[in-house]
Amino acid sequence: MKLKSLFFTVVGIFLILAANAQASGDYKVEHKNAIVLAMFGTTVEPALEGLLNIRSKINAKYPDTTVKIAFTSNIIRKKWQHRAEDPDYIKAHPEIPADVLHVKTPLATIADLQNDGYDTIVIQPTHVSMGEEFLDLHTYVDALMNMGTFKKAKYKPFNKVALGRPALGTYGQEHPYAEDIETVARIVEPDVKLAMKEKAGLVYMGHGNEFFPGNGGAYLELASKMRRIYPDVVTAIGNVEGYPAIEDVIELLNLYGVKKVVLKPFMIVAGDHSINDMASEEDDSWKSILDKNGFEVIVVKKGLGENDNFANIFADHAADAAKDAGIILK
């Protein structure tokens, strides 16, 4: 009797080990795809419309793909985190999506996705130009793709991680930046038509970066392209930080003899910079500076992300990044 019990015990252990060995040997990786929209962010509630519009365009293009948003600005994220802990704020603003209230960094968002089984990710920045934050994202992608494992390659944390390009493009021959600039120039035609209707020049206020060389060159090239495509309207673009500045804009307007301008943010959202640096009555706002220099100013506080065609640029760039990396988005 004891021998019979021992026999069945041994057989049972053998079958369990065999089953485990078979399961281990048949392990198959099922790749799951996701898109992370890396946005600078905004703390201005109405300005969120531009960001959420971009997300809606991505969702419409890829209805079967998980799409997450992330904010790259530390200051903006912290402010939303404080708001998320304030029951009075939440009660007063039921329109704010939960993923904005609890927004995370791009890396934290990717980590959450990886924890949920996603290993194939397209990071699509919603930045206007190739600046400091885009290059930071580039280093993230390199680091994530270089993460290995002591075991077989199939156990790597990530299968593929790809980075899309900003609105005005980036370096490389695969997607010439000049074509991206022309695409943007044609998409903002409604702004030109408004300036034409008002018999005015068009002045855009970009963000810029005083410590990042070459960032202003893309803006200057875009303005030049627009003056060629739309010769009846003088377009000038300057930045809050770095070159070209408002003084350079005024110099160009004077050269062309422009006396009236439509002033609009060349930013994804009409947020804090638009409200304070561009349109306020403070002495150092662009509106005040232009007023003091004899220009009649028409202010338009509307972000680029609110333009459906501009928002679709990022959906197209995410598609290009996925195709280049061999990622199939659905």
Image (tube, rainbow, N blue to C red):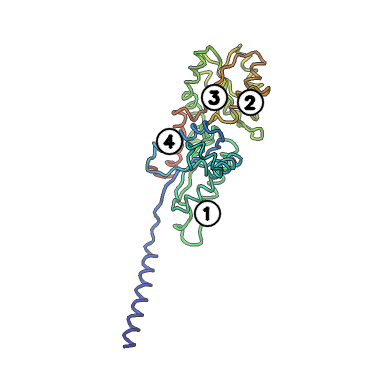
Check whether the beta carbons of the residues at disc 1 and disc 3 lie within 8 A of each other. Answer: no
**First of labels 1, 3 by sequence position:** 1
Asked whether, in this view, residue 212 is left or right of residue 176, the answer is: right
**Residue type pointed to by label 4:** Ser
**First of labels 2, 4 by sequence position:** 4
What percent of the width, then of the height, locates residue 221? Answer: 56, 25
Q: Which residue is mark 3?
A: 301
Q: Which residue is mark 1?
A: 147
**Residue type pointed to by label 2:** Pro
| Other residues around mark 2 within 10 Å, as few (<14) / some (14–19) / many (≥20) | many
What's the distance in space between the residues labelled 4 and 3, CA to CA? 21 Å
Question: Which residue is at the front of the view, 138 or 12?
Answer: 12
In the displayed structure, would residue 235 be above or below residue 23?
Answer: above
Q: Which residue is mark 2?
A: 244
Query: Which residue appears at 47% of the width and 54% of the height?
Result: 115
Label 4 sits on a secondary structure element that is helix
**First of labels 2, 3 by sequence position:** 2
Label 1 sits on a secondary structure element that is loop
Label 2 sits on a secondary structure element that is loop
**First of labels 1, 4 by sequence position:** 4
What's the distance in space between the residues labelled 2 and 1, CA to CA? 40 Å
Q: Which residue is mark 4?
A: 56
Question: Which residue is at the front of the view, 98 or 240?
Answer: 98
What's the distance in space between the residues labelled 1 and 4, CA to CA? 32 Å
